[in-house]
Image (cartoon, helix red, strand yellow):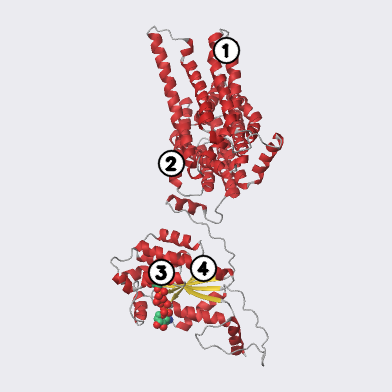
Amino acid sequence: MLSVASLGDWLGLLATATFASAQVSGDAAKGLAFGSVIAVRLLPALVLGPLAGVMADRWDRRYTMVICDLLRFVLFATIPTVALYSSDAKITVGWAAAATFLIEAITLIWIPAKDASVPNLIPRARLEAANQLTLITTYGITPVLAAAVLAGLNQLYQWLERSGVTVAAWAAPSSLALYFLAFSRLASALVVFYGIREISGHNGGGKQETSMLRQFTDGWRFIGKTPMVRGLVLGILGAFAAGGVVIGTGQFFALSLGGGDATFAILFAAIFIGLGLGIALGPRLIGGLSRRRWFCLSIMLAGVSVALLSLAPHLSLAVVGALLVGSGAGMAFLSGTTLLGGEVDDEVRGRVFAVVQTGTRVVLMLAISLSGVLVGLGGSHDVGSTGVPISSTRVLLAVAGVLGVLAGFWALRQMDDKPGVPLMADLFSSMRGRPLGIAEPSAKTGVFIVFEGGEGAGKSTQIALLDRRLRAEDRDVVVTREPGATDIGARIRTMVLDAQSAASSATPLAPRAEALLYAADRAHHVSTVVRPALRRGEIVISDRYVDSSLAYQGAGRTLPVDEISWLSAWATGGLKPDLVVLLDIDPQIGLARVGRRGEADRLEQESIDFHERVRHGFLDLATAEPSRYLVLDATRDEQDLAGEIALRVAKLLPPVPPLPPVADGDGGTAGRVPAPGEPRTAGEHSAELRATRS
Ligand SMILES: Nc1ncnc2c1ncn2[C@@H]1O[C@H](COP(=O)(O)OP(=O)(O)OP(=O)(O)O)[C@@H](O)[C@H]1O
Ligand SMILES: Cc1cn([C@H]2C[C@H](O)[C@@H](COP(=O)(O)O)O2)c(=O)[nH]c1=O
């Protein structure tokens, strides 16, 4: 019901303004007439809006809504009734104007009470769908139904008159419509009073101790100090300002396209169709994208489209621009309303909704009136000789578009809930059903080095050499691997690699199950081994990591690489290595090397084509991000490779700490040097180092 009221509100506003501008001639006068009507029409919102928010947060919202509806029932009903009993047109029209003003004022109190109540009645997860339904009903179904019913009533009335039937004055179409409106308000009051008792009892419900003035200022302070709400409110206002300029310049823009009222109507219809499409299809299109990001992107879309509209040389392109403006605005409207309902606490929600309601009206009023006046003064004559007509209308539209885009950016800076995650990549991933994850916060002070490559490339050999070298420098090193570095990982390793248990199983392991098992091992490994070591500031060297999944399950098993990438990013919380040493080897050579070890595991038994794909999968990854990779020919001499790896790793590490003085004798710290391959403590490493240096 609110929806119908607000739609009628906006349509009535435009109709009156257009009517006023048609009564005068000359661009400036037309602009002034259009702008003035709008300014006068929206004035009550300015006065009552802020107060209404305090009322919604202070009084019982259910009673507020019921009283408002009963008052509106009486007021709507009196408009045709006064006309029935008075033959004086001045009284009839005067009362209609006064009653409309009062209805407008009461509606301003009813709206925040209703808007603030809805989120308490609907589970958060369903709020967006509920808002979607409400907005589609408001801007799609209800206006069409209302127009159809009114047209039907008019036809019936005319037909009855032509047939000689005298219709009672109270049954004239406009009177019937008003009585219908009145009774719809009565019905709303009864439903809210008897049917939705849950609305009561959420806010203060009359037991407030702070003064109204204090509540009013507290509301503003809350908006100013809460970045998310600040971003939302200003984003919505920015979008409305851009929309206001489109409306205010619409008629002149139609003229600059060489059209008239029909062109204006087509553009307007396109905006409304776009609005409906954005609301209906937007959530499905963007999938799981963060709603805060969606809100900001929608505003940017609307802004860019307004700017594009300013360049449109003919109607067909202008219609495309208008459709995009509408869809951007529709999506911003839906996401903004849902965010306001879902993320603003109940005790201030009424005031926030009221600020949005009043703010949008005031901004719209200013944008429409000012742009109407400015464009009227600037004239609508084309002054360009470029083929694209340049007029003050177009300049204003371009400025509004740019302001809209800036508002979107600004809102994003205030309220982004995925800082550091690339916006467009997140959008496209979300459209494909896999929004990018937020990197897990980690106080990472260590260095993470990963060795990758095909079978038998020499990873274990090089890791051992690097480990020894780093320990000799008295550095804290953790050598680990995937899969199988933990107890659980060891069990997973058996499941994915043990050739005998695979052979005894009735069905081979499905590729997706294989990918999930590696991801499960990785999730546990990162959380229990890698991250803790990095937090301690140690050097973590891992034999295989995410790239192995991308190469083996992605390129090798031909599962979609971006899905594997998303899965790994989720499993690791976005942890990326500082360096990947890729030991590249022809699979024939690598497999021959490991063949000497004994029975091949499940993956080593794969075809040579599979291993070729894996090799190229690795090389593609390194090509895509060369700065993080060291790609080496794995057939080179072991020590040669180790030297090059050590040089590259040294660049990632702080300088070797100076050695403490050597103490000898009984209380000395120099101990026995462990045998090669024997585990060493940090003290033993420094002892070894001192021994070799002395
Ligand atoms: N540069 C090299 N030149 C010749 N042989 C090498 C070289 N590096 C390692 N090898 C030998 O190749 C075999 C496999 O080496 P290693 O176990 O280090 O490879 P890997 O990449 O860890 O194998 P896997 O894929 O099974 O993990 C070993 O016998 C090792 O001695
Ligand atoms: C991490 C990871 C590994 N694999 C494959 C690659 C190898 O064939 C084995 C591991 O054996 P290794 O002797 O320890 O190198 O598992 C994989 O397919 N996907 C992965 O994510």
Reading the image, the residue beneath label 1 is: 92
Q: Secondary structure at mark 2?
A: helix
First in residue order: circle 3 vs circle 1: 1
Kindly state the secondary structure of the residue where label 1 is placed: helix
Q: CA distance from mark 4 to mark 1?
A: 80 Å
Q: Is residue 477 above or below residue 192?
A: below
Q: Which mark is residue 492?
A: 3
- Find the distance from the CA under tag 2 to the CA under tag 4: 42 Å
Say few, some or many: other residues with alpha carbon within 10 Å of mark 4 (under 14 / 14 to 19 / 20 or more).
Answer: few
Give the quadrant of residue 539: bottom right
Residue 486 % position (x, y): 47, 72
**Which label sits on residue 423?**
none
Query: Disc 3 versus disc 4: distance between alpha carbons?
Result: 15 Å
Q: Is residue 107 above or below residue 300?
A: above
Q: Earlier in the sequence, mark 2 or mark 3?
A: 2
Closer-to-camera residue (74/181): 74
Q: Quadrant of ligand 2?
A: bottom left
